[in-house]
Image: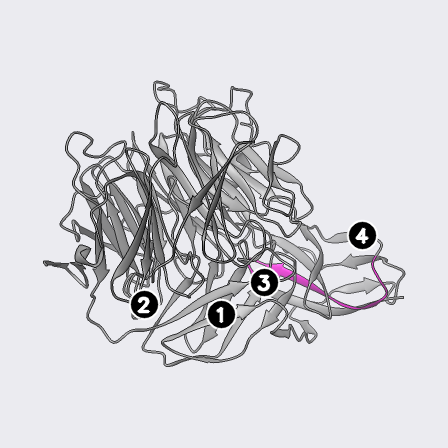
Amino acid sequence: MSIKYILILFLFSSLFAQGQITFEDQSSLLPNSARSFIASAVVDLNNDGMDDIVRVSEEGNLTMFFQSMNGGTFGSHPYDGVFIGDDTRTWGMAVADFNGDGMNDITIGGKYNEMKILTQATNNSGFWMNIADGEDIFVQGMNCFDVNNDGFIDIFACNDDGISKVLLNDGTGTFVQTLDILQAESDTPSDNSGNYGSCFIDVDNSGHADLYIAKCRQGVNNPNDPRRINLLYLNDGNGGWVSNGETSGADIGWQTWSADLGDVDNDGDMDLFMTNHDQLAVFMENDGTGNFEDRTSQAGLEDAYTFTTTQSSFQDMDNDGFIDIIISGGSNNSFCMNNGDGTFTILEDVIDFSTNSYSLGDLNHDGRVDMYAIQGGYGGDNMNPQDDRIYINTTSNSNNYLKVELEGTVSNPNGIGARITISGDWGEQIRDVKSGESYGIMCSLNQNFGLGAATTVENVKVQWPSGIVENFGAFDANSFITLVEGEGTPLQLEELELIEIDIFPNPSNGSFQIDIPEGLKDLHLNLINTEGKIVFRETSIQRNITIENTFSSGIYFLEIYQNSKVIARKKVIIE
């Protein structure tokens, strides 16, 4: 492994509007011009609670723009020569704390130019740059995620020319490439190429983030070719990953470049949106168990874009409490504004800039989601691209917000893979924390919740990757909060019996049977200890199920779910 030390000294228009959302070009906030390829990141790098910008020029120069404490201008730090290779362009980027020192680190990759791992020094003085071990690949999308749930952030890299790669973290920020876990193979044997965009999100409400891969194999025209069929791998929480794309209905065979998942209708499950190069957009609704149904036409998204796309993301751009869809590619952009009734209103070219790629986050610390926009890169204007731009969200409404940052202690430091649920008079909203998304971009780790007219949030609940579930209580609107694992109130459970279930023997030695009434479908169960940690789960359960396991003695609660809703909860005593 080669090591290079890069010294870093940390320093601290026109209006375009359409419909209900507006942005202002405030690129003057940047201290100097920059021109990126595809990948960029909007993320808090220096641990001050405010989103910064990471970008790599087409020439291979790494630059970080740090947001000032007043949420205004940015300071910059250019580092020449970060990329070394015949092709210096960056296709994928993700950010997380690799070694648990409280500072966020960076991984970047491209076309056979070696994956780079930049580990930040704890005294804010620089980054160590390591070349990742293992086979060099054509990196497309990238993610940081705890693949084996050991509390350390690993790296997942989409491979255009073969099977995607997992780099496991030994806990010190040293990564080893492995095929021993999460081999994202096609269901039908193939060379497993065509991996473009990837996203880790819990699609079946099991408490563990799953993996969805958008696949595209250029030159392959058959939509049934496995190199083109999108993959869904379910995470069992114990290091096991099972292919479920065909069963779930998410195995789309179009030339998909990017995909994202989010709860469009606030019903407690993650819906799916994808952009394709040979077909129009596809929007699929989750039935609550991780199965998907095409609802593109019903949602009014058949004409969500009429251009070649690169990126797509879910974000609540107007803070009305419903997530919207952002799409960019070629020389266009679309904002699909969620009407709150399962339909969308499509606004095209809201930003007067030929946007090919972007990253999203709060670039002036005002509670709205802004955009760092890129014109160059594959699919964009490669002949004469303009400099990157900052577009500040200036939407004029009285909607409120809540910003949530997580700090894991048992789980990984960033809480990546956690689910945040906020509740109020409106019901509930959910967000899953992810690092790396769409097609090689990185959006803020701080989760934005639009609240509409609500002035308070009654409760914030976090289900951590460790399995711990905590309530953090009420918060005022328009707050930026940091929630630390272990500092909340463990989930307080009470028995609930909307259906009658029998558990016997109870008490038991850890082996017991559950009887459920006939005729119920789409059920799964969780067994939760008194700390709120899920210690056992089972999906797709039938009427009768026997659990045989070695649990510590104590009191537990058994929950039965149907379509994301708890329909029974009973106390279980293990002696």
Q: CA distance from mark 4 to mark 2?
A: 51 Å
Residue 356, quarter of the rendered image: top left
Q: CA distance from mark 2 to mark 1?
A: 15 Å
Among numbered discs 3 and 4, the one appearing first in the sequence: 3
Q: Is residue 197 visible?
A: no
User: For residue 463, which numbered disc appears in the image?
Assistant: 3
Label 1 with label 3: CB-CB less than 8 Å:
no
Task: Kindly identify the amino acid type of the residue bearing the numbered disc 3.
Answer: Gln
Q: CA distance from mark 1 to mark 4?
A: 40 Å
* Residue 398 spot, x, y in % from top left: 25, 76
Per the image, label 2 sits on a secondary structure element best described as: loop
Magenta segment, prevailing SS (helix, strand or loop): strand
**Foreground tag (2 vs 3):** 2
Q: CA distance from mark 1 to mark 3?
A: 15 Å
**Foreground tag (1 vs 4):** 1
Q: Is residue 562 magenta?
A: yes
- In this view of the protein, which residue sits in the foreground, 87 or 211? 87
Which residue was labeled with disc 1? Answer: 482
* Residue 49 spot, x, y in % from top left: 42, 66
Task: Kindly identify the amino acid type of the residue bearing the numbered disc 2.
Answer: His
Q: Which residues are magenta?
A: 551-565
Among numbered discs 2 and 1, the one appearing first in the sequence: 2
Task: Kindly identify the amino acid type of the residue bearing the numbered disc 4.
Answer: Thr
Among numbered discs 1 and 4, the one appearing first in the sequence: 1
Question: In this view, which residue lies farthest toward the left?
Answer: 14
Which residue was labeled with disc 4? Answer: 546
Residue 485, quarter of the rendered image: bottom right
